[in-house]
């Protein structure tokens, strides 16, 4: 079992930056790939980024490539999402998630994930 708690959301102006964090507790954090998803009002939850267990493999949705960076610190049991050059279309509730231990494929689909945080709101003003 993994418990996930996101933080770092808030209000930011278009063109600005924000860094989200997701702290994990429970069993060995390094056994889990991690992902970030987001859900805007009236829309489906969508994939944002994912990172493999050892951090060597990174995956991004097309709309955030070159602007967002996912990283992790296994010693601190934390995964980060650095968001740069944000725009109003990035406004959403952002969730971090973990699949079952050992899974490193199919990370772009929400169905691959077993554990979810409560979400943190990101609002980008124009």
Image (tube, rainbow, N blue to C red):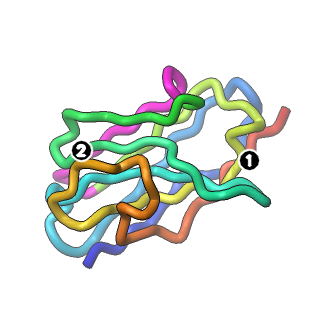
Q: Which mark is residue 40?
A: none
Of pointers 2 and 1, the one earlier in the residue sequence: 2
Read off the magenta span. Answer: 65-77
| Residue located 50% across and 35% down the image | 61
Front in this rendered view, residue 19 or 95: 95
Look at 35% across and 50% down and name the residue there. 107
Does the magenta-highlighted stretch encompass residue 82?
no
Residue 3 in percent (x, y) is at 35, 74
Considering every residue shown, the one lying at the far right of the view is: 126
Q: CA distance from mark 2 to mark 1?
A: 28 Å
Instruction: Name the mark on residue 123.
Output: 1
Mark 2, secondary structure of its residue: loop
Whether 98 is drawn above or below 55: the answer is below
Q: Position of residue 54 (x, y in %)?
A: 16, 43
| Total labels drawn | 2
Q: Is residue 28 left or right of residue 93?
A: left
């Amino acid at each position: 079992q993994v418990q996930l708690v996101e933080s770092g959301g808030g209000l930011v102006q278009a063109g600005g930056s924000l860094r989200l964090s997701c702290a994990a507790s429970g069993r060995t954090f390094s056994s889990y790939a991690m992902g970030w998803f987001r859900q805007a009002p009236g829309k489906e939850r969508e994939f944002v980024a994912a990172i493999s267990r050892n951090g060597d493999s990174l995956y991004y949705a097309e709309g955030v490539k070159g602007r967002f960076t996912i990283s992790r610190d296994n010693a601190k049991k934390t995964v980060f999402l650095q968001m740069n050059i944000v725009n109003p279309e990035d406004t959403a509730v952002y969730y971090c998630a973990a699949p079952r231990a050992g899974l490193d494929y199919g990370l772009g689909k929400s169905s691959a994930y077993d554990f979810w945080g409560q979400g943190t709101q990101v609002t980008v003003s124009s």
